Every structure is written in C-alpha cells, then in structure tokens.
Amino acid sequence: MPTDRATNLVERTNVDGNVRQKSFYRSFIQFLFSNLGLVITICAYTIGGAFLFQLLEQYIELQNCQQGALTENISITNISETVYNYIAISDDNVTTMYETIVYFLTNLTSDIYERRNDLRYTGQNCETTSGWNFPSALLFTITVVTTIGYGHITPVSWEGQITCICYALIGIPIFLLCLSNISSVLGDIFRFLYSGLLHCCCCACRVYTRARRRRIRELREAQIRNPGGINYTGTASMDPSWPETSRNQDGGYGDDDEDEDDYDIFDRMEGRVPFGAVILIIIGYICLGAVMFNKFEGWTMTESVYFCYITLSTIGFGDYVPGITSSSTSGLRFLLACLYILFGLAILAMCFDLIKEGIVDKFRWFANKLGIIADEDNQVDEDTTKYANFEYDTSNEQQTQPGSRPNSGKRAQGKPKLSESFSEPPAYEYDAADGQWMTNIRDKNERTGGIGNKNGIRMNNDKH
C-alpha cells in the first residue's frame, strides 16, 4: 500500500518539535535551580510582587485617605462650632467650662486615632503622598519573603490579604533555597580568600621551619658518622644491625614524616575559618550598616546598630524603618535598605555555615580523642580486614562442601560463624582419614593445589 510522504514528513516534524520543546523546558528548569537562576528568580519575584501590591492597594489607600481627610474636616468643624457655642451661651463657671472643653478635645483625639487605625490617615496629602509607592512596596515584598515583617505597611483589602498569603507561601521557600545556595558559594569564596591570605602569610614560616629542620638533620647525621668528633679520612663502616645504619638509609630522623605533619597542620588551618574571623565579619557588616543609616536616616549609632541587628536576625520589630520619613531621598533610602538586607542575610547565612563546620570539626576531633568514633583511615583499614576475612571464610566453605566426609561434619559444627571470623583468624584443620594437615589460609589469587607430602604442606603443581 503506498504511503503518503507528506504525512510522514508532518509526523516527523511534530516529533522533532516535541523533543526540542521538552529539551528547552528541561534546560530552562535546570537554569532556574542554578545559583544565578535562583538570584534572578528572587529579584524578579520581589519586583513583580511590588508592582502587584501597588496595583491592589494603591487605589484602596487613596480612597481611605480621602475619606479620612473628609471626616477630619467634619470633626474639626463640628468641635469648633460646639466649643464656640458652648462658651458663648453657657453660664457655667470657669472650672466646669474647662472640664467640658477637655471632654470635647478628648473625643476629637479618639476620632483622630480611630481614623489612623482604620483608614491609615495621618494628615498627609492624598494626591502626592502614598505609602504604596514602588520603593516602599519593594521593601514590603522583601520583608515578606525574608520573614522580617516590619509592619510599616500592610494590605488592607481582602484581595491584597489573600494575595499576600499566596505570595509568602511561594516566596519564602524560594528565598530559603536561594539563601542556602548563595551562602555556600560565599563560604567557598571566603574560604579560598582566607586560605590564600594564610598561605601568603605563613609561607615565610614554612621556609624557616624547613630550613631549621634541615640543619638539625645535618647535625645529627654528622654526629652519627663521627660520634667522637675525630677528623679522619676514609669510609666509615657500620654493622648493618646497628640502628644508625637504618637511620642513614631511611634518610635521617623522620624528617619526611615531620614535613608531612607540617603540611597536614597547614592544610587544616587553611581548610577551616576560625570563629574569630567569622565574628569579625558579622560585627563589621553591622557597623557598616550602622554608619550608613546614621548618615542617611539621622539615627544615633546605638539606634542604627539596634536596627541592623534586629533586621539581620529577622526579628523585625518595625519601630525603626528606613525611608519612612517623607523627603526627596526616601526612595533611595528604601533601595539602599533593600540591598543591605539581601546581602546581609546572605553573609549572615555564610557565617552560620562556617560556624557550623567549625563546631562539627571540633566535636569530631574531640570524639576521636575519646575513642567514641574511629578515624577515617582506621575505619577503612578495619572494613578492608573484615571484607578479606569474609572472603576467606566463604572460599573455605565452598572448598570443604564438595569433598566433605562424615567425620568432617563434626568439625564443621565447631567452626566459628561468619561474624566471629572477622575477629579470629582461620584455624588449621586435621583430616583424620588420611592423616594430612590442611590449612584454610591461602592467598586469594593463588590457585588451589593438591595435598603435598606427609608434613601437610599445600604446594602448587609447579613447585617441588
């Protein structure tokens, strides 16, 4: 039956398009979960959230502001008329009039606080001032995904509140994943810089230590060659059984081992960042933020340090919020605060990772000293020995099962189990039938040979 060529070409094109589309989606997802992809995702998520909350809350804020301004004007007009009529008409004494006026002013103060809590109106200009401008909305989204939560602005409408819940459910896990990856990258970078600086600073110490050990080795070798200090010509002969001969042949008094220990010490120093350096990083970043907020916000140094610590620890009381005072640089101050918070949380997470690695290393060293856990090299040797004993035991069982005799079954009952063979070496067996000695210990690569002479020595076929 003839096939339609055009149909086959269309089907092949559709299959290639689907494969190409799946490959694109796979590459895109891999990029999103990379370090750069997560950073771009968080930036886009916070910026998009700022625009979204502006769209949802700015119109409601304008309506509440206008309503608050209207009710405030009405309250001021009513109380001024009431006080004027009371003073003009009333015949009460001065004390009673004073108490009545205080009562009127108290009611006016309660109305002002009520408008502030319900309508978020504090007497600002509704046309030019907005709490949901872009810098403020961006700071709000950052405090949501970082779980700081200043509370300087909050969504009022039910749409904004539902959106805030969904926004936090998605944004917080993404930010925590990004923070974990970025902190690990920053930790590797800082560890590399610290090890490079330590290597440069300790290079002179290594050179001095090696030269000193080389001089000591030469002096000791000279003492070995000429113990009495007598100058003579010729070649000194030593008994090979003397320990000095082995020391000369080995190259001295373990200088290579000392060099290896020296390398191990410096490698451990370069691999771990000390607690003091990590604490200095945290203190330095907090002091940098304190100087910055002291200059831009006009806070005292104590208040600035307090704000930086409360912010970076994600406590976020909200009593101090940057950029909340209206001025020409309020937007710039909001953006600086956003950058300081994001970089500060990444640096703080990096410091916590370095502290955790140091604590784990200290506990592992302490447990090794107490014998609670085995060293890695000793554990590898022990596992290798157990595996070798297991191979010996299984090979012995496979050898004895085919040619076993009735009296050998009694001996098999007395053999140790597999778990016991790890700690006890294989024992020699005696065959009562032919009077031959047999051993279970043989090399794994050695082929099985026949039973030798009457002395019971197992030999290969190619040996005598």
Image (cartoon, grey):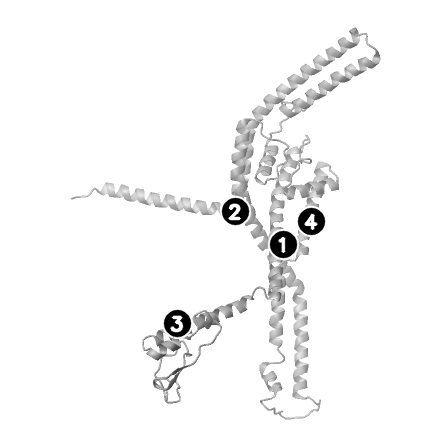
**Mark 2 or mark 3: whose residue is earlier in sequence:** 2
Q: Is residue 72 above or below residue 48?
A: above
Give the CA distance from mark 4 to mark 2: 26 Å
According to the image, label 3 marks what residue? 394
Q: Nearer the viewer, residue 213 or 448?
A: 448
211 relative position to 250: left or right: right
Q: Residues within 10 Å of mark 4 (few under 14, many from 20)?
A: few
Residue, x 66% and y 56% (percent of image)? 275
Q: CA distance from mark 4 to mark 3?
A: 63 Å
Q: Is residue 437 left or right of 49 when viewed as pictured?
A: left
Tell me the amino acid under the disc marked 1: Ile
Which amino acid does the dot numbered 3 rest on? Thr
Q: Earlier in the sequence, mark 4 or mark 2?
A: 2
| Front: mark 2 or 3 | 3
For marks 1 and 2, give the CA distance.
Answer: 25 Å
291 left or right of 20 in image: right
Which one is in front, 244 or 363?
A: 363
Q: Place residue 295 in its image quadrant.
A: top right
Residue highlighted by disc 4: 284
How far is the residue under mark 2 from the one under mark 3?
53 Å
Figure quadrant of the C terminus? bottom left
The secondary element bearing badge 1 is classed as helix
